[in-house]
Amino acid sequence: MKSQQAPLINANFLVDNVDATSAQRRLVTKRRLASLSRWLHIYLSMASFAILLFFAVTGLTLNHAERFSARQRITQIKGKVESNWIKAEDAAVDKLAIVEHLRQTHGIKGALSDFRLDESEAAVSFKGPGYAADAFINRETGEYELTETRSGLVAALNDLHKGRDTGRAWSWLIDASAVLMTLVSLTGLVLIWFVKRRRLSGLMLAGVCGLACYMIYLFLIP
């Protein structure tokens, strides 16, 4: 009888041992996932702290633009470019020379946004965050009138928030900040899942806040 029961005992022992090993591996995996999520959450939060603070503050100034807006400073300047730069046929107009003359002579900022030509006039526009400059050039004489508009620091920050007239590099920064914020949010959700005491209340709070936003959109927005 003993010789017949021994294999059964050994088999049960092996099954229990496999189950224990499997449970231990799951526990180790959970701990590693929690540790990785905590590490990512902390350092991603610190990496995105400045940009998150920027978008939070400018979100407030943008939402209440009428309270934070400053008086625009408008400057009108007259000047003249070489007539041979602008008097030629449309295809031969020296656009580069004209643009560089305006930049160097008047310290124009912003990127060139438009250069339009008609029979009698050329219109050159520059745009930047909180900034605009428009020059209208007489194609016969080369004389021009430049209007420069500065909308103030808050307007510039609001344009940066919206990514308006900010260029490709700032657009990439906005994309990078969006990715960072998404990762911070997801790692936060993973972390709350491992905190048993706060798991239910934390997930319920996230759900309630999400539902509240949806209800405001559904019923309070015309």
Image: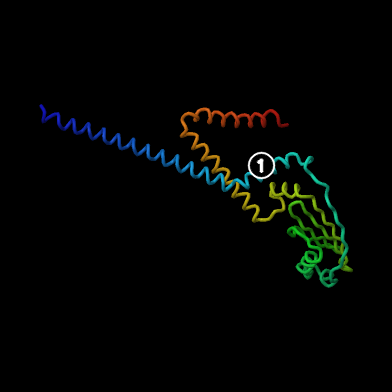
Q: Crowding near pointer 1: few (<14 within 10 Å), some, many (20+)?
A: few
Residue 69 in percent (x, y) is at: 79, 44
- Work out whether 162 lies above or below 10: below
Q: Is residue 147 left or right of residue 27?
A: right
Position of residue 78 measured from the top left corner of the image (x, y, whole percent): 88, 63
Residue at the spot 75% in from the left edge and 49% down from the top edge: 153
Residue reaching furthest to the bottom:
84
Looking at the image, is 8 positioned above or below residue 82? above
Kind of element beneath mark 1: helix
**Rendering coords of residue 77 (x, y %):** 87, 61
> Which of 16/122 is in front?
16
- The picture quadrant where one finds residue 135 is bottom right
Q: Is residue 182 left or right of residue 167?
A: left
The residue tagged 1 is 56
Quarter of the image with the C terminus in it? top right
Quarter placement of the N terminus: top left
Residue under the point 70% across and 53% down: 166
The kind of residue on which mark 1 rests is Ala
Relative to 140, 196 lies left or right: left
Left or right of residue 22, residue 160 in this image: right
Which residue is at 48% across, 28% downward?
197
Whether 1 is drawn above or below 21: the answer is above
